[in-house]
Image (spheres, rainbow, N blue to C red):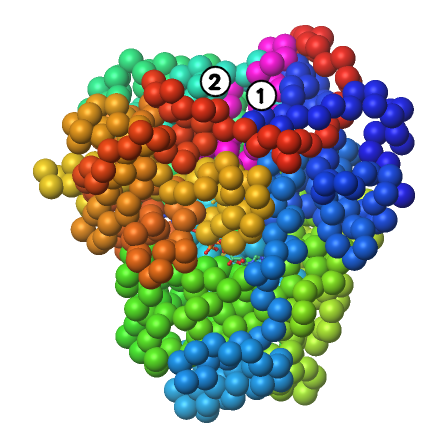
Amino acid sequence: MRTFGAAEHGYDAGMATSDRIAQPWGVRTPYGRGENWPSRTDMFLADGVRAETVERWVPSASVLHSNGDAMDIAVKDGRIVGVCGRTNDRVNRGRLGPKDLYGWQANHAAQRLTEPLIRVDGRLVPTDWDTAMERIARRSRELLDGPGPEAIGFYTSGQLFLEEYYTLGVIAHGAIGTPHVDGNTRLCTATAAEALKESFGSDGQPGSYADVDHADVIALYGHNVAETQTVLWARMLDRLAGANPPGLLCVDPRPTKVAEYATVHLAPLPGSNVALMNALLHELIEHDWIDHDYLAAHTIGFEDLAQQVSGWTPERAADICRLEARQIRQAAELLGAAPRLLSTVLQGFYQSHQATAAAVQVNNVHLLRGMLGKPGCGVMQMNGQPTAQNTRECGADGDLAGFRNYANADHVAELAELWHVSPEDIPHDGPPTHAMRMFELAEQGSLRMLWVSATNPAVSLPELARIRGILARPELFLVVQDIFRTETAELADVVLPAAAWGEKTGAFTNADRTVHLSEKAVEPPGSARPDLDIFLDYARRMDFRDRAGNPLPPWTGAEDAFAAWQRCSAGRPCDYSALTYAKLREGGVQWPCTDEHPDGTERLYTDGHFPTDPDYCETYGKDIADGSTIEEQDYRARDPRGRAIIKAADYAPPHEPPSEQYPLVLITGRTLYHFHTRTKTARAPQLQAAAPEVWAELCPQDAQGAGVSEGDLVEVYSRRGAVRARARITGIRPGVVFLPFHYGYFDDDGEHTRAANELTRTELDPASKQPLFKTAAAAIRLIEHSDGVAPAPTTGASKPYGANVPETVGGERALADHECAEPKGGVAEPVS
Ligand SMILES: Nc1nc2c(c(=O)[nH]1)N[C@H]1C(S)=C(S)[C@@H](COP(=O)(O)OP(=O)(O)OC[C@H]3O[C@@H](n4cnc5c(=O)[nH]c(N)nc54)[C@H](O)[C@@H]3O)O[C@H]1N2
Ligand SMILES: Nc1nc2c(c(=O)[nH]1)N[C@H]1C(S)=C(S)[C@@H](COP(=O)(O)OP(=O)(O)OC[C@H]3O[C@@H](n4cnc5c(=O)[nH]c(N)nc54)[C@H](O)[C@@H]3O)O[C@H]1N2
Ligand SMILES: [Mo]
């Protein structure tokens, strides 16, 4: 039995409670550069439950962001009754964020799917598993016998477990032989993967969260870490509160918490990231803030970059970004003078214009400055979803499993050998079909069956009117596997009820390569089943077999699937070969984890050697500006021989710039309290109450121009649709309107007026194929004045400007416990 507090430090030594809606980051535990981040153990238990009366604590990690906060699930009477952060875990040292603390309540929500549904005479009706699965198997057989494997597509997630993705990848690539498999990771971190591949030869974060402990400057590019990885921000806040605090560079058009604490805050006009990056690189070169030895020994391509950025003076970029040249110079100096620089990149770059080109320039800053593979010198091309890294590793994003190169015949042969199939069975003629292409194929009619697991495209894809039309096509056989009856499920032919986190076992990997095991704590509701079991049931019904006549995939449970994945990953950059379930039960471990590195690997590329060898690399790469593929012989002709590749790109203006009719740039994104389409967070009362309805953020000038003040009902409209929302006046940069994308159209009686994606457009980054959710032209008009205020939280970037708005609080029901290892707190000794 675990007793919170009593075991380690004597009961109530540093124990306290706080409202973690009002204080999302909790209390400070300051520390100085080079010191260990002190622990702080956070716990939230259901009303009336005390730590002493919890029956079991089941190890897991959080699934409502990519940070990988380790936690134990509290179980009593067969139900989840709370969570407690794991004090000794390398990622969070016991801390949890608001979604971690309160989000588990969704597991027991009354609206959980408990039985399969099939469409009969136009309506979804309950059925049994046999009927539902046979319907899917029958349709699959018809399509395989008729038009063939390319009529079938799978659209999965960044929220399942590693074992589930690997199984799905083997079914799609090995057993069916369809190239149409992708994840919602395409909307999320396709650009992270692409940027890592283009610069370093393979996906995989070079750095570690421990770099926060050592960095002198932390640069955050389009990353609102304070709201989207709250525990990582708590680590940064603790450094800021300690000795030798780091400088912060924030590049974000909104007044985020990061911006508030920043040494330099640049708020560029959305869609101008490449112009800004080129000017920053221009300044690094101009001032010779460059590690020439590193550059010569470990990179190729510097001359191209130097030439590309030579004309990009701060003045030129300032004009495009609508910044002052002086601010860009200050930012460059911060980057250029830092002895240890850590950078993070996320959706403000990945979902904006020229995504890969911009993200790669951040890698270039690190290559120029020789700031990789050393403490404090990481670059985090962040993930967003909890298990996005696994979607990519296991091939469920269409890439081949184990970061293998589809254009390398030896890599395909290795997979064929592992799966006992022939190389021709594995589609590898060209790059994998990306998600938006799959929807296009369904629209055109050649994709006839789409199996959607753990994602809600009817809310999360751009240009929803079009997406609804595609999903509703009678010619498309749509399978939806979810834990709730989502907007997407409403359009399905078959709905499969899945077991959720806490109800099934599997491993997953966070944004700094830390793998955690999440074990089953409670039974799923009704007849809901783990996603792994559903995929395996399908494979058995389809009687997929390998060359020797054995079932394909051959495994029957999570641990066997994991063992098969270990073999598949062996020798590849994401090597899990020495990482067993037994080892994971001791806590999080960073891959690669091999016999030589049995405790995992904190940082990649410590010796300056990169996985760019032509025989080893994950890709021969692309032109980062236009997306065209580089052929094998061209790559070999410029063989980087283990050096990193510096790729330059010119700035190109956005394709839908503001106009007279649509004078604003629309950006969309997140708030601290909700996760995506809110299937879980809307069902956690503390979270839902903190951000109950959609709002629109505007700066005072733009609001005034439209005759709008705080709380007024406005319509935000683009060429594609309109959304109604209460206006929140904030310090957002002029010319920009922000909408959170969390609010689907579900509660709206079919009136499609809430979802941000009614307004977004179908445009992709040419290299990563990630949709642009952050650069479109829009306009606003006043619908009606109001005496009230917008339903937006006051704690983060939606903080009100001027108006008298009550603070966002959670009250009594949001009180959570915490206990600090060093209850004294205080400032740590400076490190020389
Ligand atoms: N609370 C919460 N946390 C989450 C999630 C969630 O839904 N809710 N989702 C998780 C997932 S899947 C993801 S992908 C991450 C996303 O995490 P983030 O990327 O941090 O979140 P976003 O709000 O999408 O976008 C970040 C910022 O980009 C800025 N931005 C917009 N356009 C531009 C631009 O052109 N240039 C620059 N420089 N900045 C721009 C926006 O102002 C915004 O503040 O969060 C993860 N964590
Ligand atoms: N406008 C705009 N659009 C965006 C973004 C943006 O910033 N702006 N961000 C994009 C990004 S980064 C992302 S990641 C996507 C997210 O978009 P989605 O993936 O569509 O959003 P979620 O609400 O996370 O959907 C996950 C679904 O999986 C279900 N689920 C949860 N756990 C399980 C499980 O264990 N098994 C199964 N079978 N189902 C489960 C949930 O109930 C939910 O319906 O949205 C993208 N869309
Ligand atoms: Mo994401």
Residue 759 percent location from the top left of the image: 27, 50
Q: Is 95 situated above or below 332?
A: below
- Any magenta on residue 230? yes
Q: Is residue 205 left or right of residue 302?
A: right
Image location (x, y in percent) of residue 789: 36, 30
Quarter assignment of residue 728:
top left
Q: What stretch is highlighted in magenta?
A: 217-244
Q: Is 650 rendered above or below residue 679? A: above
The circle on residue 237 is 1
Tell me the amino acid under the disc marked 2. Tyr
Numbered disc 1: secondary structure? helix
For the residue pair 540 and 679, the one nearer the viewer reads as 679
- In the rendered image, residue 448 lying in the magenta stretch gets the answer no
**Location of residue 329 in the rendering, given as x and y in whole percent from the top left corner:** 33, 15
Mark 1 or mark 2: whose residue is earlier in sequence: 1
Residue 344 appears anywhere in the view: no
Whether the residues at callouts 1 and 2 have beta carbons within 8 Å, the answer is yes
Most foreground residue, 645 or 362? 362
